[in-house]
Amino acid sequence: MERHLHADIVIIGGSTGGCAAALAASRAGKRVIMTEETDWIGGQLTSQMVPPDEHPWIESFGCTASYRAFRNGVRDYYKRHFAVLPAARANPHFNPGNASVSRIAHEPRAALAVLRDMLAPYIHRGSLTIMEQHKAVRVETAGDEIRAVHVRSSLTGDTAVLTGAYFLDATDEGDLLPLSGTEYVTGAESAAETGEPHALDGAADPADMQAITWCFAVDYIEGEDYTIQKPEQYEIWKQYSASFWPDRQLSWTGLVPHTLEPIRYSFFPDGKSFSLWTYRRIIDRSQFAPGAFESDVTVVNWPQNDYWLGPIIDVDEEERRKHLENARQLSLSLLYWMQTEAPRPDGKAGYPGLRLRGDIAGTQDGLAKSPYIRESRRIKAETTVVEQDLSPECRKDGLAADYFDSVGIGAYRIDLHPSTALRTYIDISSLPFQIPLGSLIPVRMNNLLAACKNIGTTHITNGCYRLHPVEWNIGEAAGYLASFCIDRGMRPRAVRADGVSLGDYQAMLAAAGVELKWPSPRAL
């Protein structure tokens, strides 16, 4: 059976950026359809189980008003529904997990609840339709326009044909780009092409992409045994060591990303070493009344389960399935190793009380619904952000490029995990940056916008544009841009090219609480 559905704006992908785009377009009074491949909207916040990575000033400035509302909603969610102790409840910067890497580490289920609440008024009104468990399978085009996107239900196999004035690609892998014939790039560019100091010296390598990670959540119940069945690939991963790694991957040894020096981790905090337990902890039970939680809960998104042995983008289906399964096996092998063989400070081996929390992931196998995708297909855009735009080494005035068409701001180090070409970390300083409108606009297609990690960045600059608040800002800007274009009867590149229209659009963003310029914070 095939249905035909029409909206003003069709968003393919219910990622973090997709949700922000749907919220923006709905607030602008547009009818919106958003699809999502899993049964959880939210992308890296939910189905990929990645607590927010943010910059040092996030509690005061440096994000959009709607992203701040999301963060406040997460805090309110716990304070409304859980027995939060008085000191934690009174903390305006309450961090449910007290993670060392995140100022608001929380369960993916909490993020999902808040996102659904934020979108609920438009769903109930009937102006926003969310089609979960639907994947784009075909795109109809006419010249430089998308006419329709065909999506298929993973539950029934039925297809739906979606039509609209504008189409936003908010998938984590840039799925619409190859389907629509939109020009795009993947992997690592050549320095000869981009001039970037940290780009490849030789030819570009489209298959050289950052590691993916299949995250999972665990708690720890002393005296119990929750050891999982030995994974099929355990003996392989138990022995594996990359040439650039100081030890076996399944060990307590890793690398400091920005110095590449070996580092010895501790599992639980010991006051001396970097604790992996608190690194991405999403529940710190000491902040809740006794009995509220049996244990702290932490997300395992660590160097030990980064998978870099092959890309999953632009390979045949068999190759993709192989690497996805290998990534799953690596994560399960890490858990099994921790439960059975990991060295302990007391001289024993293994922590059998580690319990895989599939309920937190919303899955039966215990792993996240989707792997964490750090690097997408990226559009060939009106503007491509390069390292020279934001590296302190290149910007002698200490300021990132000032884009005339800024649609938001972000800040994060240029942080690239080991890649599928078996290259080690690239982790270098960056300056707080702007998001240029030109990076959302493809060089040719007229009614397609990038709304996720698929904007016009390079392999290098993707490393700082891929984080939660930036992706949210990208999606929000895309949602408002499509709405603005419909209202004005203009195309996105025409808005960018016309000073008056661009100013009006930027005023629309500012009125919605989108910050377009930084004060003067330091480099990261």
Image: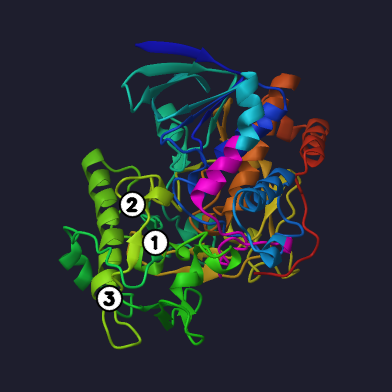
Looking at the image, which is closer to me, 7 or 397? 7
Of marks 2 and 3, which one's residue comes earlier in the chain? 3
| Residue 350 point in image, percent of width and height | 27, 75
Q: Which residue is mark 3?
A: 350
Query: Within the magenta stretch, is there residue 94?
Result: yes
Q: Which residue is mark 1?
A: 218
- At label 3, the amino acid type is Gly
For the N terminus, the image quarter is top left
| Residue 117 point in image, percent of width and height | 62, 36
Q: Is residue 165 above or below residue 184?
A: above
Of marks 1 and 2, which one's residue comes earlier in the chain? 1
Q: Which residue is mark 2?
A: 366
User: In the displayed structure, does residue 512 sit left or right of residue 227?
Assistant: right
- At label 2, the amino acid type is Gly
Q: Is residue 463 above or below residue 136?
A: below
Structural crowding at the residue carrying mark 1, measured as other residues with C-alpha within 10 Å and reported as few (<14), some (14–19) or many (≥20): many
For the C terminus, the image quarter is bottom right
